[in-house]
Amino acid sequence: MLKTTAFVTLSGLILTGVAQADVPRVATDIAPVHGLVARVMQGVGSPDLVVQPGASPHGYSMRPSEALALNQADFVFWMGEALTPWLEGSLETLAAEAHVIELLHAEGTTTLAFRTGARFAGHEEEGDEHGHEEEEHHEDEHEGDHEKESDHDEEHDGHDHEGVDPHAWLAPENGKLWLGLIADELAQFDPENANSYLKNAAEGQAEIEAVVTKVNAALDPLRSGGFVVFHDAYQYFETSFGLSALGAISLSDASSPSPSRITEVRDTVAELGATCVFSEPQFNQGLVATVLDGTNAKTAVIDPMGTALPLGPQFYPSLLLDLGNRMASCH
């Protein structure tokens, strides 16, 4: 239900306009979703952000102000339980009266299944799938137990790695689709500003198209060489721009890779001639150095969340462009 102030002065109505009182209060989970909503609401209002830049979305302790934003929200746009499992309960208790839209499962959204191996499908050598299992089986008993324990820790830290990969915001087509969905939802709720929402969404979609053209041109050199990522968050971007990662150092940004996984990734870089190993700003750079050891691969820092980018209506196209340029710089 819309929250409005009971006492509004005549001068306040003149200064802000009657339509301003009807602007919905909107909360979002992560910065990329916030950017899309901010683009749709540009010139009308501003959404609130729950998970602050630099924080992991997979596990987060809300501040009182963020809990209040959920409690006061008329709408909550979020990626979904697959990315922020802790948020589902908070939505049920704090945002029970809000319209909650889970973008990952919105009609028309392109989704991809998780990749779980250190070396991704399409890059395995014959017999590779079972080679590492056989190697671990012949290790001495103590070391084998240690590595199995490490693998167990890796698989059970962070979010679930079965089903749909939640990093779907890195597909530009999803971003365009969601702009339209957000605009339609807000326009129905707030018809006085419907034209603004719909116009903003259309302009935002055109901005994404323009950025896709730039990113495609920038990434041309990278298509001729393979690369490894720190954690598997980029397959939507890869699919959208015709790239193909060889593997990932870590299963998740919420877990540490086992020694056997690091060895497998390092072997992948050497055997398949990877030209680049991408790190991320908030994670252990020493692991990247280990993977690079003895190879000719370069390295660059990329970030699927756009932590260093300013929030606001231009965040989403800026994220795509920044990611594309950073990846291209590593060729």
Image: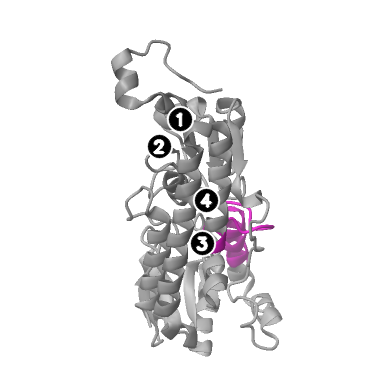
The image's mark for residue 136 is none
Callout in the foreground (1, 3)? 1
Residue tagged by mark 3? 170
The image's mark for residue 44 is 2
- Residue type, label 1: Val
Magenta run includes residue 153: yes
Vertical order, 163 against 41 (above or below): below
Q: Earlier in the sequence, mark 4 or mark 3?
A: 3
Range of residues picked out in magenta: 145-173
Mark 4: give few (<14), some (14-19) or many (20+) Cα within 10 Å: many
- Compared across the picture, whether 11 is left or right of 150 comes to left
Q: Earlier in the sequence, mark 4 or mark 2?
A: 2
Magenta run includes residue 111: no
Mark 2: give few (<14), some (14-19) or many (20+) Cα within 10 Å: some
Helix, strand, or loop for circle 2? Answer: loop
Image coords of residue 129 (percent x, y)? 69, 79
Residue tagged by mark 1? 23
- Residue type, label 3: Leu
